[in-house]
Image (tube, helix red, strand yellow):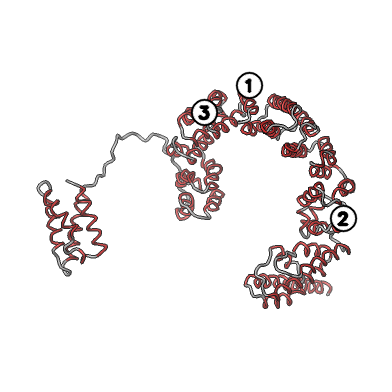
Amino acid sequence: MSLQVLTELHEEVRRLFIAGSGMASGDLRLRALQPRLEKLADAAPVLGRLAEGVQALVESDAESSPGRLLELGTLLHAVMYTQGRTDTQGELVEAGADIPTGTTYVPYRKLKPLIDALTERGPGRLEIIRSALEEGLFGDIRTHRPAVIALEDSYAETAEFVQERVLPAIGAPAVPLLLRELNLQGGKADGRRLLAIHRLQGPGDPSLYLTALAEGAAELQVAAASILGDYEDQEAALLEASRSRRKELREAALLALSRIPSTKAADRLMECLASEKDAPLAVEPLRLSQDPALTARVLSHAEGLLAEFGGAEKPEAGLIARMAATVSSLGTKREGDVLSFLQKLLASPHFMKRETGEIQEEAAGLLLESGDPQALGFVESLHGEWNHRLISFALRAALRRLPPEAVYERYAPYVQEKKTAAAKELLQTIRRLTTGLSRIGDGAREAREAQPWDDRWLPLFIRLDEEELVCRFVPEAPEPEAAAYVLAKLDEQGGRRGNNPAPLLTALFRMDEALASERLLHVIEQRTLAGSWWYIEYDLQRLLQELPASSADRLERLAGQAKNEGIRRALEEAALVARNKEHGSKGEADKGEGIES
């Protein structure tokens, strides 16, 4: 029986069911199918009945067409149903023992949101998955396959969370599912599957990973190379991969080689470090290596590069790039020889040139991170060297090893020359180091205790008109000079939109809470009366919570005058907080009277 003519007739009947049977009378498409059905009627008589049904429908009127369309459709569906197949093609084989089994102890109503989060798209899914992991829902077998599917999630954070947290929680039952879904010619999802299989199975037979490295798609090759670092006997495969034309594969192979303690692996890493093309790829593997002999080879290589700097007036870009990679590769090393070389580097006139500025900063940063007293002393001694190029690092070293008064006496003279490069660098460094001082209460107090500063910095910053630093350095006590400076700055702003008075008001709150409260209310009044206040800064809103109980009525009045709904709600909330303070203080007073009586 020809299925094509039946399929075409089914499409036309479906069209008429949608459009209405009244469209069937004289339909040209149905008329074209009738001769074809009649021609096939000799082989299958039922097709003759379909041809008669088509003719009756085409010749029907508006009154009879609905019934005839229904008759034709019923017969057609019955005929098509008989043409379907229910058997499965192919050879039947035993499933084997790798089909995962497990419990289904969680009600499906509770699992449904988790399964949807793992298999569908949309916001908020990662939180559902996190909560399910904490509740232990992944012990239910019905979550295992959705978890494997989630490795394909377009939202990388979700896929990585499933790979790193969910699948290890499921454990061995996930391995057969991962193997079944694995496609060596796939993409990122299959790379994650391969990594998950290795993590769950542990080191064993490397044949799957070798196949992926040799025949897999790009993502699979990278994943396989990273896995083979756990197989010391596969060093040859990794050495070959490290010479691939693809950068990503070379990088993965070099990282894997860093975990293999062999001479050949070390030779390959040093070969890459010496090459301008692959030197950046060797940095992370060398940083991760724990081999002291390899570190010694890196230092010897660095000494050779430093000697090359002495032979040229202006160092070549390739030499600078190789030295940059070499210094970066020493980033995790704290041995005395490494620290000595970094100091030698920063003391070399041939190296300390403008072109090597980034390497100088990295070397100074590594010495600071080491915490070694001798290294800190060396960095601090650089404050007056090399045109003050590393003065910011010197300041940070001084703060760690000198008393506050000594730091001020050494670095304040540089800051006083405000227009110089050294002063600008120092001021920027102080801003970065004192962000914690901009808070109120315990936060600022803890920041001051963690890093004390000499009191003389405050009047210096006032003279230099460094408003931001003045606000940070004011003490938690009355300070007339600083208070006058802050009030003058607030007067300059005049409550104008676009200015942010929060830092000045925060400083004022630390010195004089009553005065600061009054000035804050004054600023709010200025902005409200201006009529163009559409946004309240977060820091200013936070300061409103510091207002005393006596300000509640005033805040409510200002809330009533505010034109913007967001401003009005913020002021009403602040008024409520102030009102609660009033009730709280009254309750304490009543409690005290009760005790006395």
| Relative vertical location of residue 344 with respect to residue 107 in this rendering, above or below | above
Left or right placement of residue 424 versus residue 34 in this view: right
The picture places residue 457, in percent across and down from the top left corner, at 86, 54
The residue wearing badge 1 is 263
Q: Where is residue 228 in the image (x, y as percent from the top left)?
A: 54, 29
Residue at which label 3 appears: 204
- Looking at the picture, does residue 373 appear above or below residue 204? below
In the picture of the structure, the residue carrying the numbered disc 2 is: 460
Q: Give the amino acid at mark 3.
A: Gly
Residue beneath the point at 65% across and 71% down? 569
**Disc 2 crowd, CA 10 A, few/some/many (<14, 14-19, 20+):** some
Mark closest to the chain's N terminus, 2 or 3: 3
Q: Which of marks 3 and 1 is nearer the N terminus?
A: 3
State the SS at label 1.
helix
Q: Nearer the viewer, residue 169 or 149?
A: 149
Task: Using residue 332 as the reference point, say whether residue 229 is left or right of it.
Answer: left
Give SS at disc 3. loop
Image: 444 above or below 141: below
Left or right: where 34 falls relative to 407: left
Rendered-image quadrant of the C terminus: bottom right
